[in-house]
Amino acid sequence: MDPTVDKLPENTHSKTILSLNAIGKRFGKVTALEDVSVDIKEGEIFALLGPSGCGKSTLLRIISGFETPSSGELLLDGQDMTRTAPNQRPVNMVFQSYAVFPHMSVADNVAYGLKMEKTPKDEITDRVNQALTQVHLQDFKDRMPDQLSGGQKQRVALARALVKQPRVLLLDEPLSALDAKLRDAMRLELVKLQESVGVTFIIVTHDQSEALAMADRVAVLESGRLRQVDTPSALYQKPVDAFVADFIGRVHTFNTQHISLDNGSVTALVDELDSITLPLTELPDGIQAGPQPESPAVIAFRPECVSVQLATATPPAPDAHIQFNGFLGDIAFQGQHSIVEVTRGDQQSVTAVVNHQELHTLQGQPLGTPVLASCAYSDLMLLPPA
Amino acid sequence: MKEPKKPFEYSRKWSMRWVFLTTMVFLYAPIIVLIVFSFNNSRRGGNVIWKGFTTKYYAKAFANEELMLAFANSMTIAVTSTIISVFLGAMTAVFLWRFRFPFKPLAEGLVSLPIIIPEICMGVSLAMFFSQMGWWTTGDTPWPFNLSNIILAHITFSFPFAAMVIRTRLQNFNREMEEAAKDLGASEFQVFRDILLPHMRPGLIAAALLSFTLSLDDFVITFFTSGPNTVTFPVKIYSMVRFSITPEINAASTVLIVLTLILTFLALRYQRLTDGPDRG
Amino acid sequence: MSLEDYKQQPKVFAAFALPTLIWLLLFFVAPLGIIWLYSFGENVSLVDIETTWTFDNYARIFQPEILELLWRSVWIAGIATVICLIIAYPVALLIATASPNAKPWLLLLIMLPFWTNLLIRTYALLNILGTRGRINETLRWLWESANALLNRMGLEHLALLGDSFTPLKMLGTPSGVIFGIVYVSLPFAILPIYSSLERLDRSYLEASLDLGAGQWKTFWNVLLPLSAAGVVTAAIITFIPALGQFLTPDLLGRGQVDMIANVIERQFKRANDWPFGSALSLFLLYITFVLLAVRSFYDARRGSRS
């Protein structure tokens, strides 16, 4: 099954539910977050993605109220919530460890938040049942947490948060504690659950495949700064800089020496290679033309766009392809496709993801056979450096 | 078939087993002799020769009013000091576990000092303190207030142990539980009552049993802080031992040993709960 | 897990911390302060002491008979500690290498006597060590059996085993006191050694064997050095209480083998010389601090090496 089928078209979430305005957070001298501004829309799955220590967990804790930002403000449905205590916010969280109370039964865990609101007993029973049904735990009401598996505990944590009917549900690394198989199943299930309850989900994760598969939009954070907020496909196809390109999927990057824009085309002098001309009519944001001491931009392309052929075969058109002469390295068979390494002496090697047909021509050739790797100019990305 | 001995399986070497067995005999023989001879039908002190089985020394011990008063005193002291020790120990454990504050190593050192310093120093200093303050030192204070000094002394040496046990339990508390409760709308107090306290409970019980045992065990500090007419069980046995050795002392001692054994087993059961990892 | 800064919730912090701190100041620091003042004082009447900041009480510690007492306390505690360590090491090693099922039970066996009242354990030894105690009765029985055997062999005229059985005198001698201290402090010695052996990675031993060292060489060159920290801890936490022992020398020494605590007790209960008793108590406390400092120094040095 393809998780992307569950995604709602983008125009259905138009109304902003949560606004982060210029959020900054310092711990002593360490800056954890700097000038983070983003609007999260009602009903979407929004992922905060970044390597560990990028500030994504701090941001989640600011939204949940366990941290107060040093600067900036947080608006929920247009109301300032920056300094509201966590127990007063209509925002609930599924913790990374699930934090299911070990001394309470499943039903008591789910009922806890409602008891805190002084909800009438009958209503508690009804809503608890309903929430447990939503996560398929209706038969586990009276179990104690130590009789549950990791996946079941996570459902309890989900039910416990959802039963409060929060405006926004926060999920901190929701899949990291599960084993690989369960993780894939749970991805789909979370997306389906979100669809059926309609609550806005904010998911923190360090796993880009998780973010791409589940989220409607993804925010890429690095060193406390927001690098890019976009849909998964836009992040993949149009990363704003080399960091995002490298973080979302694999990428080869080559520094450039000189960029020039003339007559509606961009020319770049690439390290290790000749000058190339890109089919662009203007320079991307953050890149300036002219000779500069530091590399002004990088040329990036993905291994999926690289083709490999024997050096003896007819080469592709040289004025439309970037080409690398090299030697056949290791081939890793991966089922649908294979990964081929092209070594280039002491220069960086190039990796290609090739299909069965391409693989066929290469298989059986001894290691070190001269080959040609190439990538069409149209698949190249010109990006500001990381 | 028996597995061959691996090079470092010391526990399977006969020489090691003999050392262990001899040590066990060394540790247990005196206590077993003491218990066995509490049933010896002989008036003579020293418990030398077995003269037949009797329980009359138990009857005699239970009929000894001074001994029984001493026992009642010891129990009163143990119960009172346990309650306060656990309370104080829990507070100590929580603040040391939860907060970062200036001079924390100093505070930690101060809390663990009563565990480390020689009993005699603590006994002497508390005795001097009480006499300086003129607290219940005259001997005509009515029961149970004449026990106050001993109770204060017992709390002082046992609450650091209680704090240690409770802190161990707190150490494997998942702070996300607290945040989860707050996130679900609980106030600071509700978090404490609904989440932290239930988590601490096995630690509190283990600490209580430990404090109780420590209080019953103590001789030296009690010996110094007891007033002229206040006698506890160990102090009473001490004065009886100095006078002569009789099977009655053996009987009284056996009662205390059995009591301590029961408490120890209970403590260990809860200790196991305490040390177990959180399956949460 | 991160700790909270006390400034975030000063009231909660104060509510939890103050009772403990006040209690310790009142019932621990203040009492020690009082005997500290007394130690610089003089008796002005039977019960009144004036703090005159004299060093006489400390000077008296260096009188020959007190020095002799200190020396006796140190060597009795020292020998007892060494004996404890010698017994404790193999016992700890056995427990550490026992099967996981047996371990808790073996540990429990070690701990159980430790939970029994110290006075009762010492009293139990009285029954064992006396001239008519278990040990001497067993020896007497052995002597009588051996003698009877010799008599039957017609050797009575030689009186090979002496004319009559002379019981070993243990009560009232240092050996009796040492026996008692070893008896009451053995668990203190076993547990730290056990925990250092328990944490030891067995592959070090296997590596040593693999590199050609024998069992004994491995023991001396690998096992013992790697568990040295546990042995040092065991030595110190056995020695400190042993040095301050009151009951064992009192009951088993019969007033003939006094240690520091017995003399301290006498100053307060009979001699009524509180200033000197205070000085002696504090002296004992200072020795304790020095030993603890030695241990943390040792730990710190080990820590910096690894």
Image (spheres, helix red, strand yellow):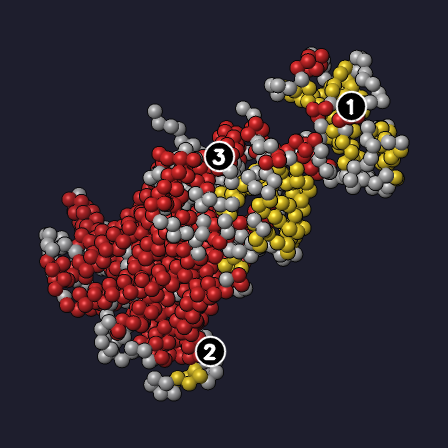
Q: Residue at x 58, y 54 (%)?
A: A80
The image shows residue A33 at horizontal and vertical percentages of 64, 50
**What residue does disc 2 label?**
C59
Residue farthest along the bottom direction in this orientation: C45
For mark 3, give the secondary structure. Answer: helix
Residue beneath disc 3: A196
User: Dot 3 falls on which chain?
Assistant: A
Q: Residue at x 33, y 69 (%)?
A: B152
Camera-side residue of A250 and B136: A250
- Residue marked by disc 1: A376
- C-alpha separation, residue under disc 3 versus residue under disc 2: 86 Å
- Of all chains, the one bearing label 2 is C
Give the residue type at disc 1.
Ala
Quarter the N terminus of chain A occupies: top right
Q: Is residue C279 left or right of residue B148?
A: right
User: Closer to the camera, A36 or A152?
Assistant: A36
Residue flagged by tag 2: what amino acid is it?
Answer: Ala
Question: Can I make out residue C234 in this image?
Answer: no
Q: Quadrant of residue C70?
A: bottom left
Mark 1 touches mark 3? (CB < 8 Å): no
The vertical placement of B162 against B21, above or below, is below
Badge 3: residue crowd in 10 Å (few <14, some 14–19, many ≥20): few
Asked if A20 appears above or below C26 in the picture, the reply is above
**Label placed on residue A45:** none
